[in-house]
């Protein structure tokens, strides 16, 4: 796939992309939400086509003359369940991450992983329902629960092939520059440079044409995007973008460069002249979006260090947890899921306890004080994964390849099995299934002094699984804590049943791949 290069400039301010003038103007500038919706509609269409093809193939194999429609009416529960499960697993594998969707080399292995994960889950269910417990037989539920083997397999296999064809078409066509949003960044300071780097990583969706800034010292100068040490995909020497003019030249630059989006990266109050100019730009049909909001959409994080005087734009002041129904529904889900999950924990407990005891002398369980909702301190419970005197010198951040971790503890951490006793904390109401990971009081006191808005993590119950955990893993420093806070505030601001389901599915995939810390 040919990647569209942003309009870049050398340090001397000259255009470094000689093909810029030959580029056709964008004909259909798609927003990121529109791209994700388009991907979802395409995936759903491929699912429908694959369902029809699977029914026809199954009827032909069985010699069934009743037709695909009759078979669909007879077996629709399995088709519907298989289709919904496929979309959920495919989404958890990163199907709607636009950076991945734009690269075929990243799409194909994730598609294979999603198909394999679906197949594993389905056949475990297949064998479980093929020999249901006596209670189900006595209730005469066996015929209704009799699973199918070939039809769902055909269904998902054909869906994977059709989806690969559709995603190939997307990567080859809709990531073309004709569908990108040509973007001007208002403000060439730290916030502007940071959003320029984030946009550079999404060149399939945005094409940065330059900066606008009223500082006369920056006029016509090249500005380097701010590389992030926390993002391994960042180019350590990204291409620079030029400051094209001040706010008075905005309208002319929008017309000249066919700009679709203005990113407002101004962290101080906007003066009357700039405000009037922005209103004129809105009248021209240009999208204006504050830097923190676009950064959230691009990265899944709230940039707390860049909100400046506009702190209310990015922070979760009116998050779903302040409502009435969502906290009630979330608590009900926590109680039901934790109560159900305690049964397999009880079955695993003797084996885990024996392994821990044989590997390292000491107790099976480990408890520790953590800070919960509204700053309330509670005791969290885990399987012990470290030697008994791990903190004889005081509290310390857990490090990668920590020598204090035992051999069994390393396996428990990689599979996240050490977290299972927290089901008791969830049932009690100290924690939730999904939420920010609870931190120790010693670290919280330090981080609240050093990181702005850190206490906002305590606006919701902490969780066993979390948005920060699946994106960043476990923190081991103040810098990691800042990154975790950005992810946690995004979760608090956007929490929903769908987001919780996505986090849980990705957590399960992490457990199966042994990619825990």
Image (spheres, helix red, strand yellow):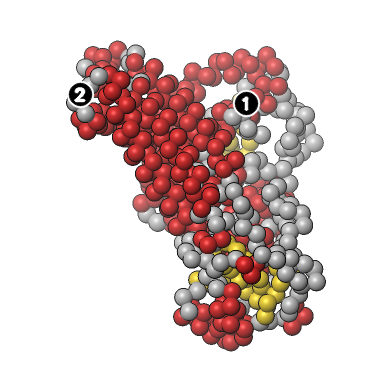
- 192, above or below 55, in the image: below
Q: In which quadrant will I find the C terminus?
A: top right
Instruction: State left or right for residue 25 relative to residue 472.
Output: left
Compared to 135, does 51 lie above or below?
below
Q: Is residue 354 visible?
A: yes
Is disc 1 placed on a helix, strand or loop? helix
Could you tell whether 428 is left or right of 441 in the image? left
Percent x, y of residue 313 = 54, 67
Circle 1 or circle 2, nearest the eye: 2
Q: Find residue 7 and report its image quarter.
A: bottom right
Q: Position of residue 203 (x, y in %)?
A: 61, 57
Query: Label for residue 65?
Result: 2
At 39% from the left and 49% from the top, the residue drawn is 41
Residue 353 versus residue 32 in the image, above or below:
above
Is residue 374 among the parts visible in the rendering? Answer: no
The residue under label 1 is 412
Report the side of 195 relative to 501 (left or right): right
> In the figure, is residue 469 to the left or right of 327?
right
Q: Label 1, label 2: how many angstroms apart (C-alpha)?
A: 53 Å
Residue 139 on image: x %, y %:
22, 17
User: What residue do we see at 55% from left, 73% from top?
Assistant: 258
Q: Residue at x 70, y 52 (%)?
A: 234
Q: Residues within 10 Å of mark 2 (few under 14, many from 20)?
A: few
Q: How many marks?
A: 2
Q: Is residue 408 above or below residue 47?
A: above
């Amino acid at each position: 796939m040919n990647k569209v290069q942003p309009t870049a400039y050398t340090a001397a301010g000259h255009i470094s992309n000689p093909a810029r003038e030959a580029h056709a103007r964008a004909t259909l500038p798609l927003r990121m939400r529109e791209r994700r919706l388009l991907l979802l509609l395409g995936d759903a269409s491929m699912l429908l086509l694959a369902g029809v093809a699977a029914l026809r193939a199954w009827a032909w194999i069985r010699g069934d003359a009743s037709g695909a429609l009759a078979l669909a009416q007879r077996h629709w529960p399995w088709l519907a369940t298989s289709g919904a499960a496929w979309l959920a697993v495919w989404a958890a594998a990163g199907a709607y991450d636009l950076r991945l969707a734009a690269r075929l080399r990243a799409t194909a292995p994730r598609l294979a992983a999603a198909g394999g994960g679906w197949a594993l889950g389905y056949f475990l269910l297949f064998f479980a329902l093929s020999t249901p417990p006596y209670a189900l037989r006595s209730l005469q539920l066996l015929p209704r629960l009799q699973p199918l083997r070939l039809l769902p397999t055909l269904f998902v296999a054909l869906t994977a092939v059709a989806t690969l064809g559709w995603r190939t078409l997307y990567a080859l066509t809709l990531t073309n520059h004709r569908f990108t949003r040509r973007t001007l960044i208002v403000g060439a300071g730290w916030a502007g440079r940071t959003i320029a780097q984030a946009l550079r990583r999404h060149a399939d969706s945005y094409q940065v044409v330059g900066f606008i800034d009223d500082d006369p010292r920056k006029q016509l100068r090249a500005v380097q995007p701010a590389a992030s040490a926390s993002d391994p995909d960042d180019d350590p020497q990204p291409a620079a973008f030029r400051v094209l003019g001040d706010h008075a030249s905005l309208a002319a630059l929008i017309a000249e460069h066919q700009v679709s989006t203005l990113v407002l990266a101004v962290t101080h109050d906007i003066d009357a002249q700039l405000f009037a100019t922005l209103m004129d730009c809105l009248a021209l049909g240009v999208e204006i979006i504050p830097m923190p909001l676009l950064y959230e959409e691009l990265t899944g994080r709230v940039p707390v260090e860049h909100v400046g005087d506009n702190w209310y734009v990015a922070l979760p002041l009116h998050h779903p947890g302040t409502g009435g129904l969502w906290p009630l529904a979330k608590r009900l889900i926590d109680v039901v899921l934790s109560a159900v999950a305690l049964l397999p924990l009880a079955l695993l407990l003797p084996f885990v306890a024996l392994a821990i005891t044989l590997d390292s002398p000491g107790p099976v369980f480990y408890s520790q004080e953590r800070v919960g909702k509204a700053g309330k301190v509670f005791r969290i419970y885990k399987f012990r994964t470290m030697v008994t005197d791990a903190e004889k010198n005081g509290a310390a951040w857990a490090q990668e390849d920590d020598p204090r971790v035992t051999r069994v503890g390393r396996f428990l951490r990689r599979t996240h099995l050490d977290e299972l006793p927290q089901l008791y904390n969830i049932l009690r109401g100290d924690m939730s299934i999904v939420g920010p990971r609870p931190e120790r009081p010693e670290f919280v006191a330090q981080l609240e002094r050093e990181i702005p808005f850190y206490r906002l993590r305590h606006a919701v119950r902490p969780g066993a699984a979390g948005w920060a955990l699946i994106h960043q893993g476990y923190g081991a420093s103040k810098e990691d804590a800042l990154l975790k806070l950005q992810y946690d505030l995004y979760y608090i601001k956007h929490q929903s049943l769908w987001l919780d389901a996505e986090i849980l599915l990705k957590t399960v995939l992490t457990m199966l791949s042994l990619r825990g810390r």
